Image: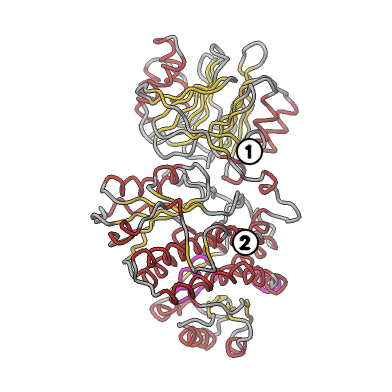
Amino acid sequence: MCGIVGYIGGKDATPIILNGLRKLEYRGYDSAGIAVLDGDNKIELRRDAGKLDNLCNLVNREPISGNVGIGHTRWATHGEPSARNAHPHIGSTGRVVVVHNGIVENYQELQDELAAEGVEFNSDTDTETIVHLIERYITITGNLEEAVRKTLQQIRGAHGIVVLSADEPDKIIAARIGNAGGVVIGYGENEMFVASDIPAILEQTRKMSFLESRQMAVVTRKGVTVQTLDGKPITPAIQTINWDPIAAEKGEYRHFMQKEIHEQVRSLTDTLAGRVDFDKGLIQLPQLKLTAETARKINKIIITACGTAQHAGLVGKIYIEKIARIPVEVDIASEFRYRDPIIQPGTVVLSISQSGETADTLAAMEEGRQKGAILWSIVNAIGSQAMRVADGYISMQVGPEIGVASTKAFTAPLVDLYMLAVLLADLRGTLPVEQRKKLVNDLRMIPDLAGKCLEHEPEVMSIARDMKDARDALYLGRGINMPIAYEGALKLKEISYIHAEGYPAGEMKHGPIALIDKDMPVIALAPNDPWYEKMASQIEQAKARGGKVIAVATEGDKNVEHLADSCLWVPSIPWMLSPVLTVIPLQMLAYHIASIRGLDVDQPRNLAKSVTVE
């Protein structure tokens, strides 16, 4: 969603901010802008709709420079994508400018109030109310910091904002309320940075701290002071981020998504490293802070997540119930709190999120907290809100994921959930030693087998060429691979814009079978697992109705090869770990169809990497 970058120091802010915004393009946006305080303490503003290149071209035609500035990439919530609605928004005096991530829920009443005072609005956005409120309170208090504080106490909703004033040019003010996006502070030598996400400033500094909800930071080139909105001083915890900036570049690949699909061998290796003792057959997840006493008290786990992460949770349910014998519910995070979930002592709310800043997932965690649940998270972004508010967490070891369509941040949490299930069973004393060692040893082969899946990419490309003109597709799966049918369909529709539906194969005759004809590709997940014979039957039923069947099958399976029109092959693997492999050809299939169709694979229309507003 919206990306924010700020700089204060001795360098020219413009290239630093534009470069930072470039690193945040993966979040999704429809316009961009930059505001810089020039040598005469005048705010220079440049904004444009569309891609960041449009803004860069505008800045090249109308250069701006200065040592203090803020920038923004916007994803429209109020007002159409246009230059007038792009951030930053400047006040009536031309002396205050704001960038904002979130929704001002009471903006209409505030706008009416300000309009009655004679304020003229120059955009259709809710954000513009913020800058006018700050100007109002500067007039009253004579102080930018206090004006921002009063403004934040008046607006409703969840927000991340950054403010710059020409009358106090030695500072940038940043604040966070609720779950709308992160606010990251970067520490340099006589320079400081502000961003909504780590990659924006990773080239500039590795030392960062993170604002919590209802905290405000006053950032100068010498450092930062942080307070709560009530004025209580906070000492921020500075973390060193070890991500490699090169990992955020495409390298030899055409798109980030393709690169990230191929990075799964490494990310799966890193996921196991330091956590699996193959000699003793033990799992260690120290960040979870899980003791045998706590494990024995757990009577239910509720997994909350959105989109791809929720599909991972559905696989995790099978792992935890099968291995650890703990009941598991899986909730779409955006619906969780509205059903008034039953949470009792011993209930764990486990949230899965790549960004750790997904608004609905954070709201679900807050619901769990209020009802007394133990909070866990599986999260990729270091220092994110979902990581910080949890009682314990498992960090995905995948590095930056830039493509909007998640790939390596799907397979890694599958393994994380599998390891969690084994650890829970071990701590609860419900898993025989030999069985535990077998389950742990099965993990050893995962990275290598993922690499073997990638070797089939030329065959996937051939099938992609055959499917490129399809208007619809039906994905079928059973048991542990049913969620992979959901995930495969999601990947296809989100980047290729082909309507696709994932469905439990056993439900095919309860409706979807009516759709099958010669023009409807049916992708059937039929690896060698406990549901294999039933899936073979589903393939035959689809073929009997003229359907064109593409099967995801275990290498060497002559039966499925005979039944299906074509096959996406995966290596043989113990059935519980099969989803880690069966999803990879479906990721490649979606990628190559979208690429052949000439679409923007990494930034599909209307989508954002991190959904930080509801």
Question: Based on the displayed image, in which of its 4 quarters is residue 206 positioned?
Answer: top right
Above or below, 484 against 3 in this view is: below
Horizontal side of 317 relative to 563 (left or right) equals: left
Above or below, 314 against 158 in this view is: below
Name the kind of residue labelled 2 in the image: Gln
At which x and y percent is residue 317? 39, 66
Horizontal side of 275 relative to 37 (left or right) equals: left
Decide which of 491, 377 is in the foreground and name it.
Answer: 377
Which residues fall within the magenta stretch? Answer: 461-488
Sequence-wise, the earlier of marks 1 and 2 is 1
Name the kind of residue labelled 1 in the image: Leu
Does the magenta stretch mainly form a helix, a strand or a loop? helix
Q: Which residue is mark 2?
A: 264
Secondary-structure class at tag 2: helix
Q: Give neighbour class at mark 1: few <14, some 14-19, many 20+ (Cα, 10 Å).
A: many
Mark 1 and mark 2: span between their CA atoms? 22 Å
Q: Is residue 478 magenta?
A: yes
Write the residue at 39% across / 47% down: 390
Colour convention: secondary structure
The single residue placed furthest to the front in the displayed view is: 280
Secondary-structure class at tag 1: loop
Counting every numbered tag in the picture gives: 2
Q: Which residue is mark 1?
A: 202
Decide which of 512, 431 is in the foreground and name it.
Answer: 431
Location of the C terminus by quadrant is top left
Question: Based on the displayed image, in which of its 4 quarters is residue 549 positioned?
Answer: bottom right
Question: Based on the displayed image, in which of its 4 quarters is residue 86 positioned?
Answer: top right
Q: Is residue 84 magenta?
A: no
